[in-house]
Amino acid sequence: MWAATYRVAQGLSKAATPGVRGFIGYLPRNPQNSRMNGLIQSLQNALALDHAGEVDAAVTLLDTMAGDVPDDGSYQKMVGLLYQRLGADRQSIDFLTRAAAHLPEDPEVHLGLGYHYMDNAAPEAAVAAFTEYLVLRPEDAHGLSFRGRCHEITGALQEAEADLREACRLAPIDPEPRLHLGCVLLRLGQHDDALDMFREARQLEPENILAEIGLRRATAMRGQGVPPQRGTGARPATVVCVKQGTKYGPEYVNRLASMVRRHTTLDPRFVCFTEDTEGLTPDIETAPLPEEGLQGWWNKVALFKSDLNSVEGRLLYLDLDVIVTGSLDPLLRYESSFTIMDNDYVPGFNTSVVLFEAGSYPKIWEDFTPDIAAKTGGDQDWVSLCVPEADLWPDGWCVPYRLRAVQGPPEDAKVVAFCGRPNPSEYPAPWIADLWK
């Protein structure tokens, strides 16, 4: 469960390189070479900073010593994997590519390249890298599982199913390939088979919240086939967002409001729920937070109160760290009582873009407790458990940055969501400068 949760927060990089500390121990050493010993110590220090949550400091430290890395595949692999773990994509691919030239038969290099390409919206290249890895380690469930996930992203669902079934066979006590196979089976409309996979995952790990989410979703979808796409003739929704605390500055609200206005012909009402209006442009309507004392994403749960006071009717909620890339008119007029993003990483939903009727799902708030906050991975897990029957946005309308939009927004995309790092303010891709303003 925790590995999957990491991937939601950090892309694949954090979970992809759990053995970095071990790899450092295998680097060539020379007691008489102070330069190499200093380099190894710097790698260890960078890893320690990462474990302490000081990711930016760890990247800065690696950057200062990157020029001293010798023309040695082992060192280049290690630095590349560590950069990858830290989410520094540009530096990571540079070192991993050089490592692959030195170490073409090293499976970890190909695995690292596969993670990089998957994390950077190049799933076909990722399939090729994972295939190279599987040539060297043909019975590795991990490689099969990730190649299957790449096939799913490209829409090759039968190939995804085949890889994930083989991963399940090779890893009989690992719930994770079963969770991902369950997701693929849901996409294929094979709800009974998906139920079996999620049941197996829960049997292997009874407290796995993702298995429970999958079970509820598969049960809700059972017998429905592939849901039809709904119409876009409903009355326009009010756009709402939430700013609490200091994680996101006022520029995120200002730019979100600007993007909304530029990408719709419907002139929707835009309301920001916040406890701090400083820095917001005067044309942004604000309202108090729906509930005091909540931190971060848990403020979204309070939007489902039976009486939201400041707004009513249909609401389109947008996270602050999304980029609007296409017309919002179809989302604002989508004919549904509850529509949400699918989660490309794990079973369940992504709450970055949600359409709902104010006050129509009060149990999301009424049943929420501090104990639930402690047991779930975030508001996404809780909403997934509460509304397993939710409609999904049509495929390609709302997509995650890392898996689907690093190279540019897909043709049909209306909204690109950022899950963890990087943030839009880091301008991790050239196209962002043209739209995030």
Image: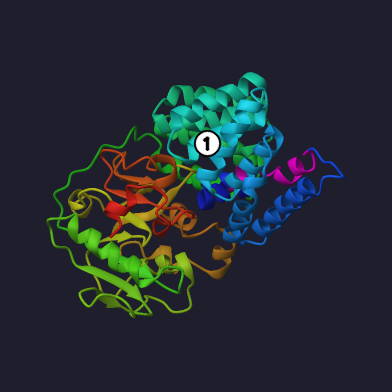
Residue 184 lies, with reference to residue 272, above or below; the image says above
Task: Tell how many labels.
Answer: 1
* 111 versus 69 height, above or below: above
To which quarter of the image does residue 257 belong? bottom left
Q: Is residue 430 above or below residue 277?
A: above
Q: Amino acid at mark 1?
A: His
Q: Position of residue 298 (x, y in %)?
A: 46, 67
The residue labelled by disc 1 is: 180
245 relative to 3 in the view: left or right: left
Between 83 and 355, which is closer to the camera in this rendering?
83
Say which residue appears at 58% left-offset and 22% top-offset. Answer: 132
As drawn, which residue projects farthest toward the right? 31
Q: Measured from the top left, where is residue 101 in percent x and y?
A: 61, 26
Does residue 346 appear to the left or right of 205 in the view shown?
Answer: left
Magenta span:
14-27
Q: On the rendered structure, is 169 left or right of 153?
A: right
Residue 113 on the magenta span = no
* Element type where label 1 sits in the image: helix
Q: Is residue 192 visible?
A: no
Q: Is residue 18 magenta?
A: yes
- Neighbour tally class for label 1: few under 14, some 14-19, many 20 plus, Cα within 10 Å: many
User: Between 309 and 410, which is closer to the camera in this rendering?
Assistant: 410
- Find residue 103 and report its horizontal and vertical position in percent: 66, 26
Q: Residue at x 33, y 51 (%)?
A: 432
Residue drawn at 38 percent across, 71 percent down: 243
Q: Nearer the viewer, residue 270 or 21?
A: 21
